[in-house]
Image: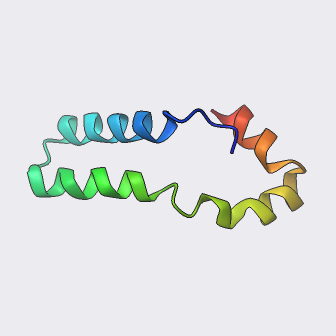
Amino acid sequence: MGHPMEHVLRQSFIALRLADKLGLDAPQRQVVYYSSLLAWVGCHVDAYELARWFGDDRALKHEIR
């Protein structure tokens, strides 16, 4: 996808820091953690639309990060 392997780890770390700032308890933090991991499981689903709208979807996602 053009992202470094650590991209999802960084995203999860940021999500958990935000959960800390919001004062979420442990069960809520678990939801945040696993939701942030799942966010990229289906990331290939939108590749067709992004490629159609913007050209190269991989280049677009590379520029976004």
Q: How is the image coloured?
A: rainbow
> What residue lies at 28% left-to-right and 38% top-to-bottom?
18
Left or right? Give the position of 43 relative to 55: left
Q: Is residue 17 above or below residue 39?
A: above
> What residue lies at 86% left-to-right and 47% top-to-bottom?
56
> What residue lies at 86% left-to-right and 51% top-to-bottom?
54
- Horizontal and vertical percent for residue 35? 36, 58
Relative depth, front residue between 23 and 51: 51
Q: Is residue 18 above or below residue 40?
A: above
What is the residue that sits farthest to the front in this orientation?
5
- Horizontal and vertical percent for residue 11? 43, 39
Left or right? Give the position of 7 relative to 46: left
Which image quadrant is residue 50 in? bottom right
- Horizontal and vertical percent for residue 64? 68, 36
Which image quadrant is residue 65 in? top right
- Horizontal and vertical percent for residue 2? 70, 38
Total labels drawn: 0
What is the residue that sits farthest to the left in this orientation?
25
> What residue lies at 66% left-to-right and 61% top-to-bottom?
44
Relative depth, front residue between 28 and 45: 45
Which quadrant: the N terminus?
top right
Left or right? Give the position of 56 relative to 32: right
